[in-house]
Amino acid sequence: MIENTLFSKPVGRETYLGNGVEVWIGHNQVFSMGTNPYAVVSISPWAFLKSDKVHKIMSEIYGTRIGERLDGSDLADFQVKITDLEVSYSNGQCEVTVGCNGIKGPANVEKLVCDGNIVTLQEYFEKILDTKLQYPNLPCVWVGSRDKNNLVPMEVNFFITSMMSYLKKKSLLWFVSYAALLQDNGIVTS
């Protein structure tokens, strides 16, 4: 069996659904050889997090002011939503796109060793990378290898919307969670 899926943004239609989510159209083709060969082509709407800074998406999803921290179950829920998605950020020399492993403590608390000195992530970004953080109280995004503690302040990261998200478990969760919303907005009918 051969299966191929491609996602594209609808042209000429509003794609933003609210709560940091936008709709993409999935084009799926399946071809099976065998005693009874067959081909299936299907088109269906899928909902993905839109491309934007992580802290802005978090604010939209939970209805908070930009820069306001989440606590308790909302913070745990957001961690589940973003784990395994792709994020992009500048490391001072180039743009880097990596997987997201979850979230850790705030930039004004998380520490790292820089030139033999222990500094907070906020101090590192402001003094070494010359990037003033507006929201150092927000959690950091844990990126890259799970064997390392690579942390980037939430306000520096962008979510990447791509068809690679389809391969991640999150796409199915978003699809199920927003099926009714797609119908309510007239994007798909039953």
Image: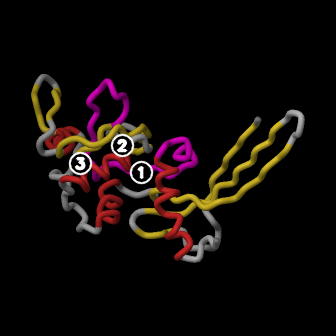
Cα–Cα span, label 1 and label 2: 13 Å
CA distance for labels 3 and 2? 10 Å
Instruction: Give the image quarter of residue 85.
Output: top left
Residue 34 higher or lower than 185, as above or below: above
Q: Considering the numbered disc 2 on the image, is that residue within a helix, a strand or a loop? A: strand
* Left or right for 27, reference 34: left
Q: Residues within 10 Å of mark 2 (few under 14, many from 20)?
A: some
**Amino acid at the residue labelled 1:** Phe
Look at the image and say whether residue 168 sits in the magenta stretch: yes
Query: Which is nearer the N-term, disc 1 or disc 3?
Result: 3
Going 50% across and 42% down the picture, which residue do you hit?
168
Instruction: Give the numbered dot on residue 90.
Output: 2
Earlier in the chain: of badge 1 and badge 2, it is: 2
Q: Quadrant of the C terminus?
A: bottom right
Magenta stretch bounds: 143-169
User: Which residue is more in the foreground, 132 or 135?
Assistant: 135
Give the CA distance from mark 1 to mark 3.
19 Å
Above or below — where is 104 with respect to 72? Answer: above
Task: Report the side of 133 relative to 45 (left or right).
Answer: left
Residue at 49% across / 63% down in the picture? 178
Q: In this view, does 78 lie above or below 179?
A: above
Label 3 crowding class (10 Å Cα cut-off): few <14, some 14-19, many 20+? some
Of the image marks 3 and 2, the number of the one nearer the N terminus: 2
What residue is pinned by disc 1?
Answer: 159
Q: Name the residue under label 3.
A: 131
